[in-house]
Image (cartoon, rainbow, N blue to C red):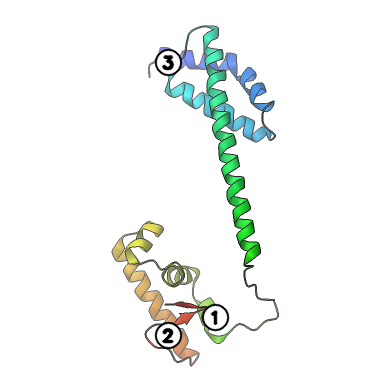
Amino acid sequence: MGIDSERRFEEIYGSAYGALFGYALRRCLDPEDAADIVAETFIVAWRRIEEVPKGDGARLWLFGVARKVLANHRRGERRHEQRTSALRSELAASPPVVESADSDPSPLRKVFRALSEDDQELLALVAWEQLDAGQIAKTLGISRNAARVRLYRARKRFARGLAEADIDHPQTVVVEGSLL
């Protein structure tokens, strides 16, 4: 993008920002959403500056882009609401088990909770999400080898904790209904 394109964008931005923001504000419930729509509209204009018409056509072109951005925003909100509603229904059908503050967790749970958060996460990814070392590596953004090493060490620390708590454990241990 050359200096002329940058100047042109700045001119378009300066002349159309207020009108676009007003357009978005009148169509959004949340001023932050309106600001996001205007920002995204100008991102499109920046990327496609060569396609932006000259003169008053630029403002009208931006309104067209803002209209499409707003439509995408609304579709995203509807999808979010649908997913949230479905999740609420699912949770209402099978409420999660929540321990009360005065309940005494099982010895196994105490050992698990005594592990570091990283160890708990690794073991949970194996037991609850049933991920293998390669999948864990992708999830955590680490190498497959690093995932294997971390998982091996977490299992060893868990086994040590079980032994210290005098909990008999075979090679696979059930933690809250899942195998480790």
Instruction: Say which mark, if any, is on residue 131.
Output: none
Vertical comparison of 93 with 12: above or below? below
Between 67 and 48, the one nearer to me in the picture: 67
Between 163 and 97, the one nearer to me in the picture: 97
Vertical comparison of 139 with 75: above or below? below
Q: Residues within 10 Å of mark 1 (few under 14, many from 20)?
A: few
Q: Residue at x 48, y 93 (%)?
A: 166
Q: Residues within 10 Å of mark 3 (few under 14, many from 20)?
A: few
SS category of the residue bearing label 3: helix
* Residue 13 locus on image (x, y percent): 55, 18
Q: Residue at x 62, y 30 (%)?
A: 35
Distance from disc 3 to disc 1, alpha carbons, whole Å, reads 61 Å
Residue 160 location, quadrant: bottom left
Q: Residue at x 49, y 27 (%)?
A: 43
Residue on which disc 2 sits? 160
Instruction: Say which mark, if any, is on residue 51.
Output: 3
Mark closest to the chain's N terminus, 3 or 2? 3
Residue on which disc 1 sits? 109
Mark closest to the chain's N terminus, 3 or 1? 3
* Residue 47 locus on image (x, y percent): 43, 24
Distance from disc 2 to disc 1, alpha carbons, whole Å, reads 14 Å
Residue 50 location, quadrant: top left
Q: Among all residues in the image, which is located at the extreme left?
A: 145
SS category of the residue bearing label 1: helix
Amino acid on which the number 1 mark rests in the picture: Arg
* Residue 30 locus on image (x, y percent): 68, 35
Residue 125 location, quadrant: bottom left
Distance from disc 3 to disc 2, alpha carbons, whole Å, reads 65 Å
Mark closest to the chain's N terminus, 2 or 1? 1
Badge nearest the viewer, 3 or 2: 3
